[in-house]
Image (cartoon, rainbow, N blue to C red):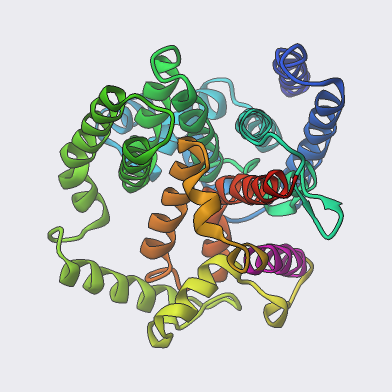
Amino acid sequence: MDIIFVFIILILGIIFLYNFKSEISENNFKVLKYLFLYHLLFGFYFSFFIEAGDAVNYWKEAKALDYDSFLNSIKNGQGTAFMNAVNYYPANVLNLSYLSGTLLFTLIGFIGLTYFYINAIKLVPNNPQFLGINLFPLLFFLPNLHFWSCSIGKDTLMFTCIAFVMHGLLKPLKRLPLLILALTLTFFIRPHITLFLLLAFGIAYFSGKDISFLKRILFFIVLIGFAIIILPIVLKFTKIEEASLSSFDKFSVSKATVLSRATTNSALNISSYPFPLKIFTFLFRPFLFDVNSIPSLLSAIENFILLILSISIFRNKPISSFKNAPFVIQGVVYFLIIGTLAFSQSLGNLGIIVRMKNMFLPGFIIFIFWHFSYQKSKEI
C-alpha cells in the first residue's frame, strides 16, 4: 500500500505542476519542475533522517486514536488535537507509514510553494537583481523554505494556507472558496495566525492602490469584522486573559521564560534582551555565531543572505517601494510585521523560531523581489 501511495503522490504532484504550464513562460515552468524535485529531496530527507520530534509524534498519536477520539478532535479540537484528527484517516484508517505521511505533506507544501512562486511571477514585473545576481528564482531555493514545508504537522499546512490566502486575495470573489478553506484551516490549526492574516490584509486592502473605494471599504469591514469576532477565541487559545498590553506582556514574559529553560542547545533567555535584539533574533537567527551543526550552518548562511538584502533595502527607500507595491505584497509585509512583533517577544528557542518564521518567509522573499524590481524600473 505504501509503495502505491508514494507513486500516487508523485503522479499528483506532476499533474498539479503541469496545470501551470500555460500560465508561465517555458523557463519559469522549467524552474518550477526543478523546485518540485528539490522539494521532494527534502521530503525524503525528512522521512529517513528525522526520527523524533513533533512530526513523528503527530503521526504516532493519529495512529493511536480511536474513532470516538477522532470525532471529538474534529468537533472541539484546535491546534494539536485538530492535527491528530487531520492525520487520522491516512495514518490510522489507511495505516500508511511515516514515509508516506511525510511525502503527503511534502506534496501539500509544494502546492503552497507553487502558489507563492506563481504570485511572485504575476506581481513582480522585472527580474530583481542584487550585485548583478538574479534574485528570482534563486531565493526560492533557500533550504528552510522547503525543510519546514514538507514535515508532518502544523507548519506545512500553515505555509500552504497562507499561500492560498495570498493567491485568493488577488481575485477574492472568484477565489472565495479557496479563501474560506485557507482561513478555516488556519483557524483550527493556529487561530492567532488567522487573526494576524485578517488584520494584515484588512489594513492592506484599505490602503491599497488601484482598488475602488467601495471595494476597499467593503473588504476592510469584512476582514476586520471577522478579526474582531474571533479575537475572544484567540485569547482563550493562547491563554491571554484580555486584549490589553499588560496581558500580552505577561504572556510574552511567561512564554519566553518557559522556552529559555528547555534543555537544548537552541534555548535562549530572550527575556533579558532589549527590544531590537529580540526583533533581530526572530528575523535573522540562528546567525553565524550560533552554528553548532550542519542544519544551523545552513540556517545561518540563509539568514546572513537575508540580512544583507534587508540592509540594502533599508538603505534604498523602502517606504517608497512599499507604498507602490500591490496591496497583496503590502499585506504580506504587514503580516510579517505583526508576526515579528508578536513572536519576537515570546519565542526563546532557535528551533521554534526557525519553524515559526517559515510562515512569514515567502512573503518576506516576495517583498525583496518587489523592492529590487521596483528600484530597477525607476532606474530604467
Left or right: where 10 falls relative to 284:
right
Residue 366's quadrant in the figure?
top right
Q: Is residue 28 visible?
A: yes
Left or right: where 278 falls relative to 4:
left
Classify the position of the C terminus by image quarter.
Answer: top right
Q: Is residue 1 visible?
A: no
Q: Residue at x 49, y 57 (%)?
A: 319
Q: How many numbered markers are drawn?
A: 0
Q: Residue at x 63, y 49 (%)?
A: 365
Residue 202 in the image: above or below residue 281: above
x and y percent of residue 216 in the render?
Answer: 30, 29
User: What is the span of residues highlighted in magenta in the rendered image?
Assistant: 295-311
x and y percent of residue 84 in the render?
Answer: 43, 37
Q: Work out whether residue 210 or residue 40 is closer to the camera in this orientation and state it.
A: 210
Q: Residue at x 43, y 49 (%)?
A: 335
Q: Magenta stretch: residue 296 in it?
A: yes
Determine the residue located farthest toward the bottom in the rendered image.
272
Left or right: where 294 falls relative to 188:
right
The main secondary structure of the magenta stretch is: helix
x and y percent of residue 206 in the render?
Answer: 31, 37
Classify the position of the N terminus by image quarter.
Answer: top right
Residue 14's quadrant in the figure?
top right
Q: Work out whether residue 318 or residue 159 is closer to the camera in this orientation and state it.
A: 318
